[in-house]
Image: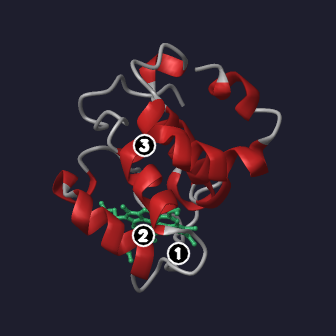
Amino acid sequence: MSRISLGASSLGAAMAVLALAAPLSGAAAQQGALDDRQLLGMRLFNQSCRVCHTKPQLASPLYGPELSQKSLDGQEAVMREVISNGTPRMPGFKYHFEPAQIEAIVAYLKTIPAPAAAAIPAR
Ligand code: HEC
């Protein structure tokens, strides 16, 4: 159960380990109750998706929409599809990530509150 706290320092190795260890996680008490798989997804998201999917200081037309559990009507299968194959304006990640990693990212997206329901972020 202490795997999570080790993760931050050994990210690379932890990714593979976390994917395998995900079923072991019970009620994850850390990081706002994200479980191991969601934490892995968060890390992958921060590495590969943030660049386009979080509000940048400088607006750019290349940036994608803010993502949340409600993206794509909250349909996990469609999320996997978009992440795997991309869209006209977004690269696909099926050769970049293992299926389990894409699953983890979807699991993480499902933890993000929809913008309308969330507090309006301070600019
Ligand atoms: C190069 C910029 C870029 C990167 C990197 C990127 N995206 Fe996207 N993404 C987009 C754009 C732009 C769209 C809007 C769809 C379109 O216009 O083609 C989008 C759309 C999406 C959607 C659909 C959202 C909706 O409501 O329609 C999801 C889900 C998504 N991206 C997830 C991800 C994930 C997960 C990653 C990382 C693995 C990622 N994206 C990386 C640019 C990017």
Q: Quadrant of the N terminus?
A: top right
Separation (CA) of disc 1 from disc 2: 6 Å
Cβ atoms at labels 1 and 2 below 8 Å apart: yes
Which of the two residues, 58 or 13, is positioned nearer the viewer here?
13
Nearest the eye: 22 or 58 = 22
Tag 3 secondary structure: helix
What residue is pinned by disc 3?
Answer: 108
**Left or right of residue 57, residue 40 in this image:** left
- Say whether residue 57 is visible: no
Q: Is mark 1 within 8 Å of ligand 1?
A: yes
Q: Is mark 2 within 8 Å of ligand 1?
A: yes
**Numbered badge on residue 83:** 2
Q: Which residue is found at the position 64% from the left and 46% from the top?
A: 17
Q: Amino acid at mark 1?
A: Phe
Q: Please name whichever residue, 23 or 62, is drawn nearer the observer in this view of the structure.
A: 23
Residue occupying the point 54% across, 71% down: 62
Picture quarter with the C terminus: top right
Q: Position of residue 96 (x, y in %)?
A: 61, 74
Q: Which residue is mark 1?
A: 93
Residue at 23% across, 47% down:
70
Q: Identify whether 40 is placed above or below 92.
A: above
Q: Mark 2: which amino acid?
A: Ile
Mark 2 in CB contact with mark 3 (< 8 angstroms): no
Q: Earlier in the sequence, mark 2 or mark 3?
A: 2
Q: Secondary structure at mark 1?
A: loop
Q: Is residue 76 left or right of residue 38?
A: left
